[in-house]
Image: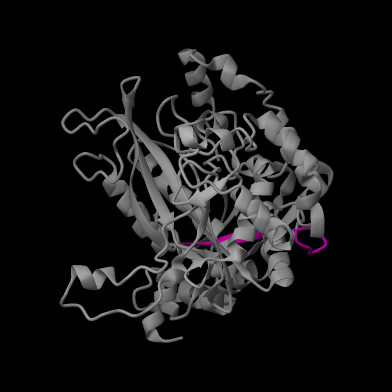
Amino acid sequence: MTNASVALNPNKLVQYLQKMPNEFTKEDLIRYIEENGIQMINFRYVANDGKLKTLNFIITDRNHLDNILSTGERVDGSSLFPFIEAGSSDLYVIPRFKTAFVNPFSEVPTLDILCSFYTAQGEPLESAPEYILKKAHNCFKEKTGMTFKAMGELEYYIKSAKAEMYLGQDQKGYHDSQPFTQWENLRREAMVLIAQCGGKIKYGHSEVGNFILREDGYEQHEIEFTPVEAEDAVDQLLIGKWIVRMLAAREGALVSWAPKITVGKAGSGLHIHMMLEKDGKNLCVENGKLSDIAKKGIAGIMDLAGPLTAFGNTIPTSYLRLVPHQEAPTYVCWGDRNRSVLVRVPLGWLGSKDMVKEVNPQQQADTRDFSSKQTFEFRVPDGSADIYMLVAGLIVAVQHGLENEDSLEKAEALYADMDIFSSNFAEKLEKLEQLPTCCYESADILLAKREIFENNNIFPAGSIDAVASSLKAYNDNGLNDRILGHHQEIMAIVDKYIHCM
């Protein structure tokens, strides 16, 4: 690896070790720890509630450190996952060296490492969401010869006391700058820390949502990542959520990924962009246009859009967001640059001329092809998502589309070339499938199509049963209609699920 590869990389371990994270070894980590005064190790892992857990180790000597990194540690699985019984609950947590980062909050110099779950027999825990994702991606690579890359748009609200001097306009917060946004500094600090911890960030900005509710100000922001391999994409989202939460807690502010804070105001999604690669080439583009491969993958997502909500929209307030005219999808269709659809193909430098040269006449012409940046975006999920299961489900869906002979015909039939709620689209809208309107419906459609997710032993049957059971336990059939117009009931349910995932 050349020095140029790491010259601007903000990851402290990359800078020090002069190698990329997927090359990190146990010996590399020990050297970094010894030479940088690291006193503690934190094992981090995600359990059933979707939040990062922590197991702390104080380093006593080199042999102790080597043992920690060589064997992992055992934990009580029954306290982490409801499907593990107390009678045989022990699990191992095994560190994934490439995920190591310096904890930016610990007063004691600390190295954090994400872990995988293993059974008493030394086998991966089949039902662990992290392993389900790994199985899905490995199967995808084997069956298609492609790599599945993804990235997320991390939208969130910060609640604080109302700012009197520079009050942003209601629902007009998109790309606002200080002083019309109170929390730009926190977002910028979060971006710096996420990058230092290994996240690949595209950009950050304030979002549309900006309103006053019950004398408190709510301000919406977004941090968007760049496409990386599926497992890494999930890791960086989880670390990103943790860092934003930690910074907000430091400031005494509430941060929430909840899909809806109040009716009539913008909700927060967790849009997932996808890209399919082979030998480093983006296969979503062919001859300057969206490729048939991409269209087939989109068709697979269309076919499984309903059951995907079981992983991506997991609380009753998820379905307060999925309503018409709020730039959130409600019908199964796709389109170019269209924010009213379920899958959007964003503007992607396909066939564009050298705009930088035109704006800057003194600049030499750039003949490179930037169409490799093209992605397609699933706009349904929100901050309640089990991100491992969601991305695993998207991989299964894309593979499903690639393997189906009629996928191109399905893609053509479900293409929307305008706002789907415009009068000119009314006739076609009546023929489109609708997304589930509550958790209960989401569970039913997952159970109806469970076989596709269970194929190739990706999703264990017990995991599908557990997801469906959890969703049905809300008993929220018809909830939206029951609480419509009842402000106190709406706010009670919003408050109940404000700290999702």
**Eyeballing the image, is 387 above or below 264?**
below
Drawn side of residue 227 relative to residue 363, left or right = right
Report x, y in % for residue 168.
Answer: 24, 34
Residue in the image at 16% along x and 31% along y: 165
Q: Which sits in the foreground, 132 or 419?
A: 419
Residue 180: quarter of image: top left
Report x, y in % for residue 250.
Answer: 35, 42
Is residue 455 shown to the viewer in this render? yes
Residue in the image at 18% along x and 41% along y: 179
Report x, y in % for residue 385.
Answer: 58, 43
Quadrant assignment for the C terminus: top right
Residue 68: quarter of image: bottom right
Q: Which sits in the foreground, 45 or 320?
A: 320
Residue in the image at 49% along x and 66% along y: 289
Residue 111 part of the magenta-drawn span: yes
Q: Which residues lie in the magenta part?
A: 110-124
Report x, y in % for residue 480.
Answer: 57, 21
Query: Residue extending furthest bottom?
Result: 2
Is residue 238 shown to the viewer in this render? no
Residue 427: quarter of image: top right
Residue in the image at 83% along x and 62% along y: 121
**Eyeballing the image, is 63 above or below 219?**
below
Most common SS among magenta residues = strand
